[in-house]
Image: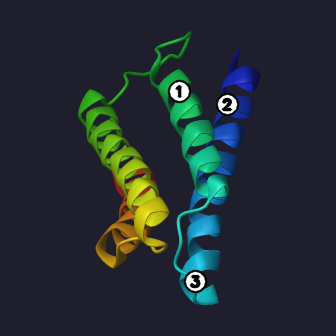
């Protein structure tokens, strides 16, 4: 069961890497657009994160405050991706505040995962 949990952690990290990597490529590439790859990374990270939040055969207590905080940030990232994509389709460019918010919140979510003990 622990091996399965570690595999889900790997999938979760891969989703984060897709989301943040696609964002970073756009940020430093000069285009600053919301891409399909960011949506894929978000979906993979979200599904795997929800699977990790389930208490499936672990011998320690889950930190529900940390899980709730990360879930709220995840929902805000999803909203920014969706709204930013819609505005990008209309005007041709993603709103700057939404674009940078996605990157900052994605990094913050990873920081919470690593630093919150």
| Circles 2, 1 touching at the beta carbon (< 8 Å) | yes
**Measured Cα–Cα span from mark 2 to mark 1:** 7 Å
Q: Position of residue 24 (x, y in %)?
A: 58, 75
- Going from the N terminus, do you reach mark 3 or mark 2 first? 2
**Measured Cα–Cα span from mark 3 to mark 2:** 32 Å
Q: Position of residue 107 (x, y in %)?
A: 44, 65
Q: Residue at point 64% right, 67% down? A: 21
Q: Position of residue 31 (x, y in %)?
A: 58, 83
In the depicted structure, whether residue 25 falls above or below residue 37 = below
- Going from the N terminus, do you reach mark 3 or mark 1 first? 3
The residue to which callout 3 is attached is 31
Left or right, 77 with respect to 13, comes to: left
Q: Quadrant of residue 80?
A: bottom left
The residue to which callout 2 is attached is 8
The residue to which callout 1 is attached is 52
In the depicted structure, whether residue 57 falls above or below residue 14 = above
Quarter of the figure that contains the N terminus: top right
Q: Residue at point 33% right, 67% down? A: 98
As helix, strand or loop, the secondary structure at mark 1 comes to helix
**Mark 3 or 2: the one toward you:** 3
In the depicted structure, whether residue 81 falls above or below residue 46 = below
In the depicted structure, whether residue 4 falls above or below residue 109 = above
């Amino acid at each position: 069961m622990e091996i399965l949990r570690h595999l889900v952690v790997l999938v979760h990290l891969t989703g984060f890497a897709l989301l943040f990597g696609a964002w970073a490529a756009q940020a430093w590439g000069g285009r600053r657009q919301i891409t399909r790859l960011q949506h894929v990374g978000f979906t993979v990270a979200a599904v795997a994160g929800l699977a990790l939040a389930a208490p499936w055969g672990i011998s320690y207590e889950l930190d529900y405050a940390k899980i709730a905080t990360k879930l709220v940030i995840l929902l805000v990232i999803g909203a920014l991706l969706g709204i930013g994509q819609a505005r990008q389709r209309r005007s041709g460019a993603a709103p700057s505040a939404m674009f940078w918010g996605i990157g900052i919140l994605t990094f913050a979510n990873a920081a919470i995962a690593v630093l919150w003990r």
